Image: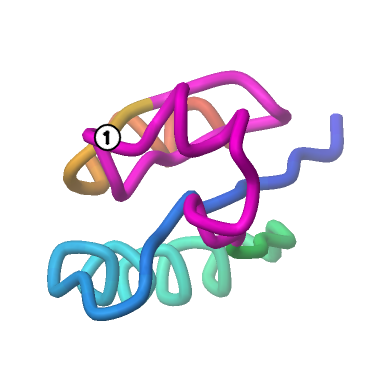
Amino acid sequence: MSHHVTLVTRVDCHACEQAKADLERVCGELGVPWSTVDVDSDRELRAEYGDRVPVILVDGEEHGYWSVEETRLRKALE
């Protein structure tokens, strides 16, 4: 099964930068594609996730927020 990870982020967010580095490493090791989306670029995203960024989505479903739980993420992507 092929997965895709999306990081919902915001400009000038230190936690978002850390999550991005974590995803770059983990997804890179596993060969899983990932992307970012700015929470402030879309009213619906901002309403849903605005106070919890960074948010990690796996295959479009919320997986976690505020930080990457590496062991849990790896298990979801296996």
Residue 78 showing in the rendered view: no
Q: Which residue is mark 1?
A: 65
Local crowd at mark 1 within 10 Å, few (<14), some, or many (≥20)? some
**Which picture quadrant has residue 14?**
bottom left
**Is residue 42 something that shows in the picture?**
yes
Amino acid type assigned to the residue bearing label 1 in the image: Tyr
Q: Is residue 78 left or right of residue 23?
A: right
Report the front residue among 65 and 77: 65
Depth check, front residue: 64 or 72: 64
The magenta stretch spans which residues?
37-63
Side of 40 relative to 22 (left or right): right
54 lies above or below 63: below
Q: On screen, 70 above or below 44?
A: below
Q: Position of residue 30 (x, y in %)?
A: 59, 60
Q: Based on the picture, tell me whether residue 60 belongs to the magenta stretch.
A: yes
The residue sitting at 35% across, 76% down in the picture is: 11
User: Which of the 4 quarters of the picture holds residue 57?
Assistant: top right
Q: Is residue 45 left or right of residue 75?
A: right
Taking depth in this image into account, of 75 and 47 the one nearest to the observer is 47
Q: Is residue 14 above or below residue 73?
A: below
Residue in the picture at 53% in, 61% down: 38
- What residue appears at the point 29 percent right and 62 percent down from the top-left corner? 19
Q: Is residue 55 left or right of residue 78?
A: left
